[in-house]
Image (tube, grey):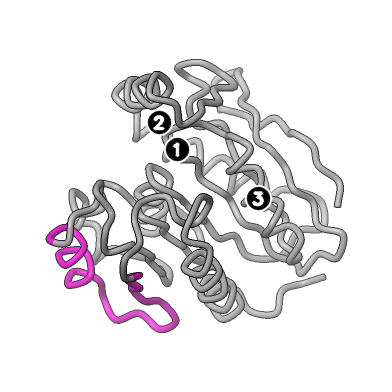
Amino acid sequence: MSEAKTTIDAGDGRGFAAYVGRPEKPNGHAVIVLQEIFGVTDAIRGVADRYAAEGYLALAPDLYWRIEPGVELSHSKADIERAFQYLERFDEEAGLADIGRVAAHIRAMPGFRGRVAVVGLCLGGKLAFRCAARLEVDAAAVFYGVGVEDHLDEAAALRCPVVLHYGDQDRYASAEAQARIEAALPLTAGGGFYRYPGVGHGFYTRGELAAAELAHERTTAFLRTALGAGNR
């Protein structure tokens, strides 16, 4: 599996980077991996690589590029503070437009005739939910999306199946917020809401291995159903 970066046309004469995981055995579909508040880090590249290893063309766009290109933060106390500063400056509407441009970039690639899913973590989880209501994507997987409860007016507008994963000990997504999200979801075929007992925030890429593996298995099964066989 080769790895590289590509440049996405921002539509205003500028461009922004996206990490690419290119599958050795393509299944015909693509996954856009949406970052946490820490940027496109090793963890996010690892998620992209994991889906690429399963046959998906996987792109992880730099959503902070309008603030500062190439942001990669650790989980140190200082970097966590910086991450929240970037989050405060992040233009969510512009970010959604950028994700739409990534999807269009994929669909314009020579020979690509498949479907496009979004997989988002933390900030990216909220964006994945909103993509499902706002953009032309074919499936959305939400890992501990923070702030989804603030956009439940968009639940009725969901255009594709959505699967959501939350730990019941997530300090950034309260039990009350999770209950509101689950109650607002339409009963779309193939989607669902999964809650993981005793599990906190960030479990898909750090800690709680059993929960992470189960969530991944559920997500890959969801994607197979939502996206179909694809064009190889």
Relative vertical location of residue 78 with respect to residue 27 in this rendering, above or below: above
Residue 143 screen position, x and y as percent: 42, 57
Badge 3: how crowded within 10 Å, few (<14), some, or many (20+)? many
Splitting the image into 4 quarters, where does residue 95 fall?
top left
Q: Residue at x 56, y 31 (%)?
A: 62
Q: In what element is the residue under mark 1?
A: helix
Looking at the rendered structure, the kind of residue marked 1 is Ala
Mark 3 or mark 1, which is nearer the start of the sequence?
Answer: 3
Badge 2: how crowded within 10 Å, few (<14), some, or many (20+)? few
Mark 2 or mark 3, which is nearer the start of the sequence?
Answer: 3
Badge 1: how crowded within 10 Å, few (<14), some, or many (20+)? some
What residue is disc 2 on?
Answer: 94
Residues marked 2 and 1 touching at CB (< 8 Å): yes
What residue is disc 1 on?
Answer: 97
- Label 1 and label 3: CA atoms lie apart by 20 Å
- Left or right of 138, for residue 150: left
* Rendered-image quadrant of the C terminus: bottom right
